[in-house]
């Protein structure tokens, strides 16, 4: 819980209109070699916990599982189980596991969701491809009620009372790691992956950035505060910002103030849903968090007709994080795919997620073209063909 770095309050922070340099160290110098990146990651994580997330515990070292029910599905090709997990402090959590019936080793995708409202749209295909899928209802750890008068963390704080600074997104991300601790002990488990939809995508990003056991972060419609940055927002090429979340809108008392640390309110404008406030005083943005996943893989899937996705801010964060991916020699692990459509996690996006996992884990031929800033040779309505501003002047150090 000790914090080795000191971070300035909002009124003493310098204004940074562009995306902040993730290579800038606490003393003002820049990272000069790959060997310095791990220490820089730890510094950036401390910064993000201070201003945005709040600290969470280390993932539990041991999580036990009790099978509550088990039944075959998909003509015997898979098994669906309900389990009660318990960590070394006694925190219980019920999860649903879908896995291939064949006990050979397979990758497992952790999916934080809201009760039964979110289900994978292609479960049978997940199993056919050789993946397992573990769902957990994140409200078991903290309540998720828009406009709640109080932040109900009773379940989490009962077992981790010293982590009072942690806010909902961080706790849900920690829940993904809790599940990973159980999965990692199973004889059939291969690489671990993490996914989430909307606010669940925000939590999945935090999980992967903090927990290096996740080989890939798979974010869908995560929007501002997820794949999309705070400073720059909007739909196609920055147009139609109405409806796109901002710090001010998220931290309003009638919205989702419990997602982030109280300090974040000082950087937003709660008077208007889509108006900007003091975002330019943040010493980070969401390219910073995306970069923390490197050299592991990350994919954002977004709907071009979804204002909550912050398509423009997601492009901007993607491009800035690419500097870190290039620096670490893993350029192809930073991906972004767009779809015509709104705020959903339906079959086309899931199929893209599975294709991406096949490429990352098995080196299979790429069956989709992940969206880049370059103009494609053949026009495609699902590809943004204009080149947006870079919004940063720094570049990765030369290796």
Image (spheres, helix red, strand yellow):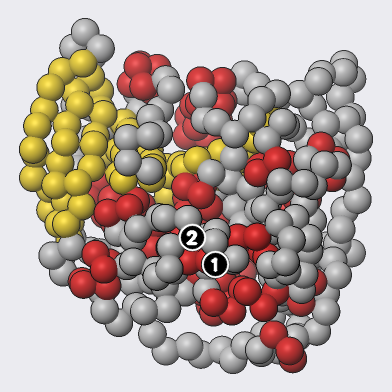
Q: Position of residue 218 (x, y in %)?
A: 52, 41
* 394 and 69: which is toward the camera: 69
Residue 303: percent from left, percent from top: 66, 32
**Farthest residue, direction top:** 75
Q: Quadrant of residue 100?
A: top left
* Res 140 label: none
Residue 56 in view, yes or no = yes
**Disc 2 secondary structure class:** loop
Asked which quadrant contains residue 321, the reply is: bottom right
Classed neighbour count for the residue bearing mark 2: other residues with Cα under 10 Å, few (<14), some (14–19), many (≥20): some
Image coordinates of residue 377 in percent, x first then y, are 89, 20
Name the residue located 72 percent from the left edge and 66 percent from the top edge: 271
1 or 2: tag closer to the N-terminus: 2
Q: Position of residue 149 (x, y in %)?
A: 43, 68
Measured Cα–Cα span from mark 1 to mark 2: 6 Å
Q: Nearer the viewer, residue 225 or 37?
A: 225
Res. 253 mark: 1
Q: Is residue 322 above or below residue 220?
A: below
As drawn, 318 above or below 28? above
- Residue at 76% from the left image edge and 73% from the top image edge: 278
The residue depicted at 47 percent of the width and 47 percent of the height is: 200
Q: Is residue 349 left or right of residue 110?
A: right
- Residue located beneath label 2 in the image: 147
How packed mark 1 is, by other alpha carbons closer than 10 Å (few <14, some 14-19, many 20 or more), is some
Relative to 123, does residue 338 appear above or below in the rendering?
A: below
Can residue 23 be seen?
A: no
- Name the quarter where the N terminus is drawn: bottom left
């Amino acid at each position: 819980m000790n914090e080795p770095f000191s971070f300035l309050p909002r009124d003493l922070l310098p204004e940074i209109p562009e995306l902040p340099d993730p290579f800038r160290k606490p003393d003002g110098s820049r990272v000069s070699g790959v060997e310095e990146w791990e220490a820089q990651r730890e510094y950036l994580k401390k910064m993000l916990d201070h201003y945005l997330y709040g600290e969470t515990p280390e993932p539990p070292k041991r999580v036990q599982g009790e099978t509550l029910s088990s039944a075959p599905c998909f003509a015997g090709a898979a098994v669906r189980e309900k389990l009660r997990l318990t960590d070394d402090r006694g925190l219980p959590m019920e999860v649903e596991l879908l896995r291939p019936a064949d006990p050979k080793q397979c990758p497992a995708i952790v999916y934080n969701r809201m009760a039964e409202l979110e289900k994978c749209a292609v479960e049978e295909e997940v199993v056919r491809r050789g993946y397992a899928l573990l769902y957990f209802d994140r409200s078991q750890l903290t309540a998720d009620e828009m406009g709640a008068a109080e932040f109900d963390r009773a379940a989490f704080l009962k077992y981790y009372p010293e982590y009072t600074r942690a806010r909902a997104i961080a706790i849900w991300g920690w829940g993904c790691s809790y599940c990973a601790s159980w999965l990692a002990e199973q004889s059939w488990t291969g690489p671990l992956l993490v996914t989430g939809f909307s606010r669940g995508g925000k939590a999945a990003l935090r999980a992967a950035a903090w927990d290096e056991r996740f080989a890939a972060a798979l974010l869908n419609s995560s929007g501002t505060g997820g794949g999309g940055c705070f400073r720059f927002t909007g739909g196609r090429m920055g147009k139609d910002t109405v409806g796109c979340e901002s710090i001010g809108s998220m931290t309003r008392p009638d919205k989702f103030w419990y997602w982030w640390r109280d300090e974040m309110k000082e950087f937003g404008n709660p008077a208007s849903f889509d108006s900007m406030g003091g975002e330019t005083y943040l010493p980070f943005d969401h390219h910073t968090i995306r970069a923390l996943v490197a050299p592991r893989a990350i994919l954002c899937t977004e709907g071009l007709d979804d204002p909550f996705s912050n398509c423009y801010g997601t492009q901007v964060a993607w491009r800035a994080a690419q500097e870190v991916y290039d620096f670490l020699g893993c350029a192809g692990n930073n991906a972004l795919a767009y779809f015509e459509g709104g705020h959903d996690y339906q079959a086309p996006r899931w199929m893209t997620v599975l294709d991406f996992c096949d490429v990352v884990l098995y080196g299979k031929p790429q069956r989709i073209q992940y969206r880049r800033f370059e103009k494609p040779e053949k026009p495609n309505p699902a590809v943004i063909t204009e080149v947006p501003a870079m919004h940063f002047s720094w570049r990765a150090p030369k290796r």
